[in-house]
Amino acid sequence: MSQGQKETITISLDAMGGDNAPVNETAGAVETIKESAGISVILVGDSAKIETELKKFSYDNSRIRVHHASEVITMEDSAADAFRKKPDSSMVSGLKLHKSGEADGFISAGNTGAVMAASLFTLGRIVNVSRPTIGSKFPTEKGITMVLDVGANVDCKPINLLQFAVMGSVFVNYIYGIDNPTVGLLSVGEEKSKGDLLTTEAYELLEKSNLNFIGNVEGRDILKGSTNVIVCDGFTGNVVLKFAEGVLTLLKSKFSEFADSGFINKLKVGMAYGTLKTILKDFDYQEYGGVPLLGVNGISIIGHGRSSPLAIKNMILRAVQMARAGINDEIAKRIKDIKEFAT
């Protein structure tokens, strides 16, 4: 349900999920309420540890509260078992606060598989959505490109890719303000006949839909920004995502290597530092915060385990934006509209 009319949006935050929890989570929450009105945060986790971190800051304590949870789901925990074995974990407790309506959205930088599983079990799916999907925004030469799925579903059916396209289109429209966003299908060639059985059958469904489908796109088109939404199975999407994350590390390494090769080169890099920083900012996951799990009956944002306070803040802001926009209502409507012709 849309929370657009609410004066204050409340986000439950898994304060024990990240690699440096609850330090970064607490700092990110405080930074958010200092910079943005109409937002409150529930920090979920070990109350003693969280309170210790909060004492480091001066903030409006009416907008941050602590909800104690006695357990923590770690990166080593099985995604499938964590929800059942640790019911009082910060992750599950945070999702339950969202499910009950105490919070309008949930974010976590914890175990990705566990966040997906716990979100699905706790919040359920939007009616008629066969599988939730994770979408990630990619830096491009122009415009917005969002790739779905980037890891939630390794094995997919054509109907899944069609629904990913619908959910991605709604997200890009509501969050980035792009009307009638273009949709491409990731394949090994632009021709309709190119690709495996999944791709060719998904092409048929996408072509018959009322989406702004432009056909197949190739890997090189992702960073070109040739289309606003690109759909693929989660195996392919996750490989693409991890490769893109490695690009930033490589670029930083190359710049450092160049600067270390001589004093003149160090000066050149220093002089260009401001420009380089601006360019590399587009590749920095901290600027995007986290990725939305679309298709669950609620708002769940999944962050990188290394999420900094900046990344946490941007995750909170994204969750608030989704809550105010009422994205799930539109997804439900659009999924229902395609149900008959796609089955």
Image (cartoon, rainbow, N blue to C red):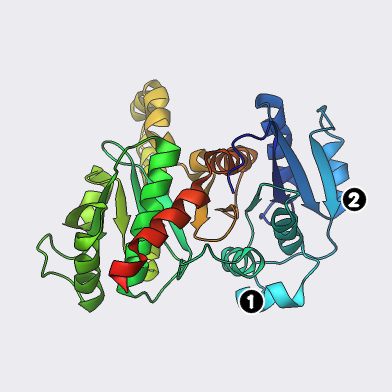
| Residue with the most extreme top position | 271
The quadrant in which the C terminus is found is bottom left
Quadrant of the rendered image containing residue 32: top right
Q: Are marks 2 and 1 in contact (CB under 8 Å)?
A: no
In this picture, is 255 found above or below 278?
below
Q: Residue, x 74% and y 41% (percent of image)?
A: 41
Q: Residues within 10 Å of mark 1 (few under 14, many from 20)?
A: some
Query: Camera-side residue: 120 or 109?
Result: 120
Nearest to N terminus: mark 2 or mark 1: 2
Q: Is residue 268 left or right of residue 34?
A: left
Q: Secondary structure at mark 2?
A: helix
Q: Secondary structure at mark 1?
A: loop
> Total number of numbered labels?
2
Amino acid, disc 1: Ser
Q: Residue, x 48% and y 64% (percent of image)?
A: 132
Residue with the mark numbered 1:
78
Q: Residue 239 in the image: x percent, y percent? A: 37, 64
Residue with the mark numbered 2:
48
Q: Residue 332 in the image: x percent, y percent? A: 47, 57
Q: Is residue 194 left or right of residue 74?
A: left
